[in-house]
Image (cartoon, rainbow, N blue to C red):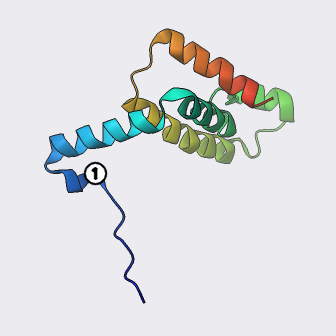
Amino acid sequence: MSKAKPFVHSKQFGGPAKSADALTKAYLRVFSGQDGEMVLADLVATVGYYRRPSYAQWLQDRKSPAGFELHSALSNARAEVVQHIMAFLTLTDDQLIALERAARLEGQ
């Protein structure tokens, strides 16, 4: 029976600065190029990052506040994942606009 290879993590690259740099570079590699952009747009669309309803919209659509608190908490948690990824990326305003457009197209 073979021993499983340990999972790579950023702390293996040294102190806090080297660890943060290694992790940032990894995120940039993963989310760069056409494949990375497509995956990021799909993730953003899947979690509904640009489709989070306000309380007023919720009431208008559902005619009741029931369920909004849970929906809002789940929506915020999903958004945290996208925000975590985007914190590693240095996207210009034009790229952010393009990402939103791509995500909206993915979500259709």
> Residue at horizontal 79%, vertical 31%?
59
Furthest residue in direction bottom, as rendered? 1
In the rendered image, which quarter is residue 106 located in? top right
Residue beneath the point at 40% across and 38% down: 27
- Residue extending farthest to the left is 15
8 sits left or right of 45 in the view: left
- Residue 1 picture location, percent across and down: 42, 90
Determine crowd level at label 1: few under 14, some 14-19, many 20+ residues with C-alpha closer than 10 A: some
Say which element carries label 1.
helix
Drawn side of residue 2 relative to residue 15, left or right:
right
Q: Is residue 93 above or below residue 45?
A: above
Q: Farthest residue in the front direction?
A: 2
Would you name the residue on which mark 1 appears?
10
Residue 24 position by quadrant? top left
Q: Position of residue 52 (x, y in %)?
A: 67, 30
Q: With 21 as the anchor, is 73 left or right in this view? A: right
Instruction: State whether residue 7 is above or below residue 59.
Output: below
Amino acid at circle 1: Ser
Report x, y in % for residue 94.
52, 9
Left or right, 96 with reference to 38: left
Q: Residue at x 22, y 56 (%)?
A: 12
- The correct choice, above or below, for 76 with respect to 6 in the image is above
Coordinates of residue 63 in the picture (x, y in percent): 86, 34
Q: Quadrant of residue 46?
A: top right
Residue drawn at x 65%, y 35% is 42
